[in-house]
Amino acid sequence: MLTKMNHEEILLTKLKSKYTDLFGSLPSVPILTCAPGRVNLIGEHVDYNDGFVLPMAISFKTFIFGGENADGVINIFTLNESIAKPYFHCLSFNTFLTEESHHGTWIQYLKGVFACFHTSITTGFNIAIVSSVPMGSGLSSSAALEVAFYTFLEKLTNSRAPTLVDKALQCQKAENVYAGVPCGNMDQLISVLGKEDFAILIDCKSLEIKYTPLKNPEVVIMIINSHVKHELQGSEYSQRRASCEKVARLLQVSSLREVCMEDLEKIRTELTEDEFRKGRHVITEIQRTILAHTALEKDDYDGLGQLFYESHESLKNDFEVSCHELDFLVDSIKPMEGVYGSRMTGGGFGGCTVSIIKRSHAEEIQKEITHKYKQFHHKEITVFTCKP
C-alpha cells in the first residue's frame, strides 16, 4: 500500500509505554531524541571516494527515549523486532565496550557512538529505541540510530559536539570501527544536517554543503522497498572499496575524485576488467551527481530522470551492487506514464529504488508496480512517497 510517512505519535506512545513497563516509571528528567533516515537521490558509492552526493532526509526516523538512572548501569531496549535478538541489554560501564558476545549485532552501533563520544560519560542510563526507518533497505537506519544516540548522550551530559559536522564524523567513525562497515560520511552528514524540503549537495572531500530546495509541488519522490535485505558487513562492500583504492594508488592520487576517464584509460592495461569498471562507475557517477544538482536547480526533471537511469545502469553493470529485484523495479516503472526516472539507492544488494514521478500519477504507478512485482516475484513491496 501507499504509506504516508507520518505516524510519529503512535510510535512515541508505544515507546513511552514500553519504557514504563520496563523501568516502572518515566524518567525524572526525560530525554527524547530522534534522527531521520535518508534517500540518496544520486551519487552512490562515491562518498568514500571523496565525491559528491545528493541525499535528502526523509520523514522516517529513529527515536530514543530515556534518562539517567541511579543504578550506574546501561539499560538498552529496542521495540524493533525485525532486528536480531536480544532486544534488551543490561551492561556495566566496564563491559559495555568490551563484551564480545555482542559482536555483529545492532548494539555495536551504540557501543561505537559511546566510545567515540567527545566527552566522558559517568552516569548510568536507561533508553528505549523505536524506528520507522526500514532496516536493511538502503535508507540509512544505522546512521539514524547512531545520530539519535549521540544526541541522547549530548543531552545526558549537557555537552554538545564542537560542530554538527564533528558529530556526524564521530558517528561515521563509530560505524567504521565498531560495526565494521567501511562506509563513507554521507549517511551521518545528512542525518545530522538534513532539512525538510531540501536536498543537500555534499562535497565529501571538503565537507562543504549546499542546500537545494525541492520546490516543485507537481513532483514527488517515490521510494519502493523491494524487501530484499542487504548486509553491508559482508566482504562485497569492502572489496569494492579496496578496488577503488587500488585504482587511486595506481593513478597516484588520494582518491578517484581527482581523475577523469582519460586518466583511467591510460592505466587500463594495469587493471583487471573488474577494477576498471569499478573505477569507471565512481568517476562517471561523480560527474552525474554534479549534473543532477544543476538539473534539480533548474527544475529539469527530464534531465534528472535520465541521469537516474544512467546511474542505475552503472551500478548494475560496472559496480555490480544491484540485484534482479531492483533491476525489475527500475525496468518496470520506466515506461509508465508520469515517471521521469528511477534507480536503485543505497549500498545495494537489495533495499530500495528511488524514482522521480508526477504527483498526479502516484496512485496509478503504485498500483501498477505493486501488481507487477507480486506477479513475477510472488511477494509484496512497500511504496512510500515524500516531497518535493
Image (cartoon, rainbow, N blue to C red):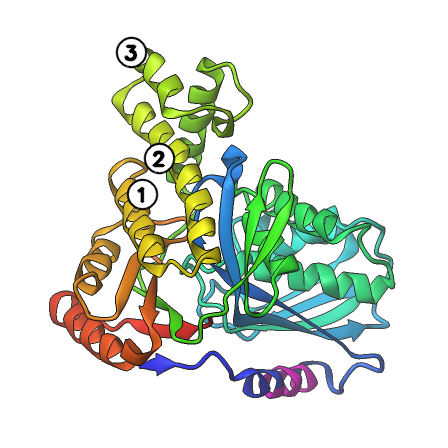
Identify the magenta region. Answer: 13-21
Q: Position of residue 151 (x, y in %)?
A: 73, 63
Left or right of residue 371, residue 121 in this image: right
* Residue under the point 49% across and 52% down: 54
Left or right of residue 338, residue 130 in this image: right
Q: Position of residue 345 (x, y in %)?
A: 38, 54
Which residue is tagged 2? 281
Q: Is residue 35 above or below residue 261?
A: below
Name the magenta segment's main secondary structure: helix
Q: Is residue 146 above or below residue 224?
A: above
Which one is earlier in the sequence, the residue at label 2 or at label 3?
3
Check contact, mark 1 vs mark 2: CB within 8 A.
Answer: yes
Which residue is tagged 1? 315
- Amino acid found under the numbered disc labelled 3: Thr
| Quarter of the figure with the N terminus | bottom left
- Residue at mark 1 to residue at mark 3: CA–CA distance: 23 Å
Q: Is residue 363 above or below residue 120?
A: below
* Residue under the point 35% across and 64% down: 356
Q: How many marks?
A: 3
* Residue under the point 84% across and 82% down: 28
Assess disc 2: are there few (<14), some (14-19) or many (≥20) residues with their C-alpha within 10 Å of its C-alpha: many
Which residue is tagged 3? 269
